């Protein structure tokens, strides 16, 4: 005598993939909200990008033996570095530049000049997003570029 076979019930591959996709989307959205949102990610990545470009400008001055200029236009929200490198700053961020006026080509433009020995004219760039602040400092004596969170909201 043979026994009747029990019918095995389960989920189709499509149903499993749909659930996994929903979990992934929910996770990404939750990470954005928990981490301060996508604007804060833009703040941090912009600060890192500007610091990297300042370091690149310094390295170019040292390697070529020729002074190199990094410029920042807070009004137009643009920056430029040697060898045609340029970029923009997201509109959600407030930008402030403090530096030597003697090397600025325009009143509304900030500039940091790096010399062949690595020294610089110095300067500070502050990026602010509703109280969350990242600050990039360029030491005038050594040309060292430092990136750090500055005060404000966590």
Image: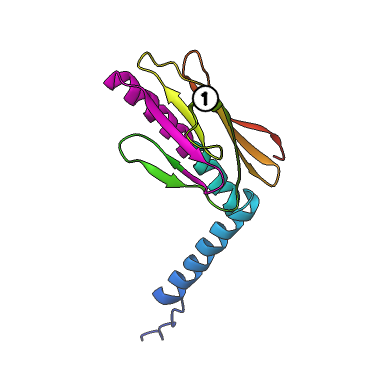
Residue at figure coordinates x 55%, y 47% from the top left: 41
Tally of marks = 1
Residue at figure coordinates x 40%, y 74% from the top left: 13
Q: Is residue 58 visible?
A: yes
Residue 26 position in % (x across, y down): 57, 63
Left or right, residue 139 beside residue 57: right
> Is residue 147 located in the magenta-colored stretch of the structure?
no
Report the quarter where the C terminus lies.
top right
Q: Nearer the viewer, residue 149 or 78?
A: 78
Q: Nearer the viewer, residue 103 or 136?
A: 103
Q: In the rendered image of this protein, does residue 42 appear above or below residue 140?
A: below
Q: Nearer the viewer, residue 82 or 45?
A: 82
Left or right, residue 87 beside residue 82: right
Left or right, residue 84 beside residue 92: left
Residue 10 position in % (x across, y down): 46, 76
What colour scheme was applied to this rendering of the protein?
rainbow
> What residue sits right under mark 1 in the picture?
102
Q: In the rendered image of this protein, does residue 51 appear above or below residue 33?
A: above
Residue 11 position in % (x across, y down): 46, 76
Q: Nearer the viewer, residue 111 or 64?
A: 111
Report the quarter where the N terminus lies.
bottom left
> Is residue 62 located in the magenta-colored stretch of the structure?
yes
- Other-residue count near label 1 (Cα within 10 Å), few / some / many at <14 / 14–19 / ≥20: few
Magenta span: 49-78
Q: In the rendered image of this protein, does residue 74 appear above or below residue 13?
A: above
Secondary structure of residue under mark 1: helix
Q: Is residue 137 visible?
A: no
Residue 74 position in % (x across, y down): 56, 43
Q: In the rendered image of this protein, does residue 23 appear above or below residue 72?
A: below
């Amino acid at each position: 005598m043979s026994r009747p076979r029990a019918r095995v019930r389960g989920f189709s591959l499509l149903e499993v993939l749909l659930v996994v996709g929903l979990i992934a989307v929910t996770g990404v959205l939750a990470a954005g909200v928990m981490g301060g949102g996508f604007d804060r990610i833009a703040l941090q990545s912009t600060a890192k990008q500007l610091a990297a470009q300042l370091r690149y400008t310094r390295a170019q001055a040292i390697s070529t033996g020729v002074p190199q200029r990094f410029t920042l236009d807070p009004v137009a929200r643009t920056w430029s570095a040697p060898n045609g490198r340029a970029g923009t700053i997201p509109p959600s961020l407030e930008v402030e530049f403090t530096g030597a006026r003697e090397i600025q080509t325009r009143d509304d433009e900030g500039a940091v000049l790096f010399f062949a020995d690595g020294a610089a004219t110095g300067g500070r760039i502050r990026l602010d997003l509703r109280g969350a602040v990242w600050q990039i400092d360029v030491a005038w004596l050594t040309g060292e570029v430092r990136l750090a969170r500055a005060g404000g909201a966590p």
